[in-house]
Amino acid sequence: MIRITQAAPQQLSIVQQIAYDTWPHTFGNILTPEQIDYMLKMMYDLDVLKELVEKKGHVFLLAEADGNFGGFAGYELNYKKEPVSKLHKIYVLPQMQGKNAGLALISEVERIAREAGMKKLSLNVNRDNKAVGFYERNGFAISGEEDIDIGNGFFMNDYIMTKKL
């Protein structure tokens, strides 16, 4: 059984570790090792994660099974001051994939967003990421594309996907 809990500030290192453990598997065939390393440092430094929580209103959820944390989701309510919940990050360790951890995380974000009066859930996903199919199977639809310059000559080439709540 998957248990979802909100990450306490001292658990942000768990979020960081899951990101470092999942990214090479998730993006190894999509991004260069240099871009993966750059993005991990840019997005998952502990100071960056703390700032997201303390100053930008992000909330991290952890997925746990059999006493082990195997995935996380990071979201924000009222994204861009709209009735939208933005799912900024969701990653599940390879050994936890197929055990409904990702679905449990998304379902909990949806529940929280609905209770907060949000009208839709939005996320960005790399256009070559196999997770696009997972999101489509779970009610998301591609609503746009964007190429985001993240510095150092690197871009995030994403679909924007949304789901009505």
Image (cartoon, helix red, strand yellow):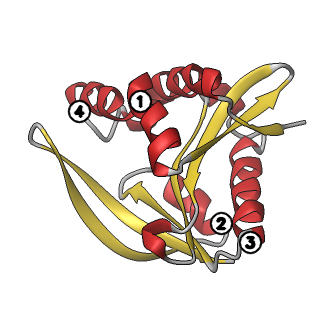
Identify the mark at residue 114; answer none if there is no mark: 3
Q: Residue at the spot x=75%, y=58% of the render?
A: 107
Estimate the spatial distance between the alpha carbons at disc 4 and disc 1, rounded to whole Å: 14 Å
Estimate the spatial distance between the alpha carbons at disc 3 and disc 1, rounded to whole Å: 28 Å
How many numbered markers are drawn? 4
Residue type pointed to by label 3: Arg
Q: Circle 4 sits in a helix, a strand or a loop, which is it?
A: helix
- The residue tagged 2 is 137
The mark that comes first in sequence, 3 or 4, is: 4
Q: Which picture quadrant has residue 106? A: bottom right
Residue type pointed to by label 1: Tyr
The mark that comes first in sequence, 3 or 2, is: 3
Estimate the spatial distance between the alpha carbons at disc 2 and disc 1, rounded to whole Å: 28 Å
Q: Residue at the spot x=57%, y=26% of the render?
A: 12
Q: Circle 2 sits in a helix, a strand or a loop, which is it?
A: helix
Q: Residue at the spot x=59%, y=68% of the render?
A: 136
